[in-house]
Image: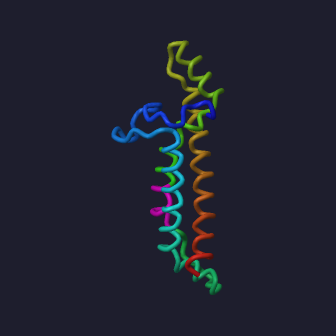
Amino acid sequence: MLSKNWRNTHYYPPFMGIFYLSPLDRVVHGIVSFLLGAFITSYKNLYIFEQLVSHDPNPDKISNWFIIPFCFLTYALIHKLIELKPLVRLKEKEIAKGSFPWKYFILDSIYGISILLILQVIYLIFVILFAMNIWL
């Protein structure tokens, strides 16, 4: 990952078929969209945190409609930057055999889902920090 040319805008295919982003642009845009989404979500769900602070016995749940799009956008921007070399080697071995790379497909899917879950947990932590430190 560190050996990439961080300023080359043609290092990866265009994002969403339109935007040519360098790896550095992908990281910066991913972080900014992530934090902007956490900021918006913390404001939209402020009433939930007020219920928690006032010790309401049945507070509402945080809506995933605000969480999922920003986590997916951040993941879509940075997932090419965080490839695992063993997974890439496994893909090359499986494709060399001439069959569909089932092992790679399953392991890569598990890896992607685990990264999305980690992003969602970090996102919720930022939402709580923003709500408690900015809005309340």
Left or right: 121 in relation to 28: right
Main secondary-structure element of the magenta-colored stretch: loop
Counting from the top left corner in percent of width and height, residue 10 is at: 43, 31
Q: Residue at x 61, y 22 (%)?
A: 90
Q: Among all residues in the image, which is located at the extreme top?
A: 97
Q: Position of residue 6 (x, y in %)?
A: 54, 36
| Residue farthest to the bottom, as pictured | 54
Q: Position of residue 93 (x, y in %)?
A: 59, 17
User: Magenta span covers which residues?
Assistant: 63-70
Quarter holding the C terminus? bottom right
Query: With respect to residue 34, does 23 lie above or below?
Result: above
Residue visible at 65% across and 85% down in the picture: 55
Is 107 drawn above or below residue 100 in the view shown? below
Q: How far across and down, in percent of the image, does residue 68 sit? A: 49, 56
Left or right: where 97 falls relative to 9: right
Q: Is residue 66 above or below residue 75?
A: below
Task: Name which residue lies at 53% across and 46% down.
Answer: 27
Viewer-proximal residue, 113 or 29?
29
Please check the rendered image and state whether residue 38 is part of the magenta-colored stretch, yes or no: no
Q: Residue furthest front?
A: 7
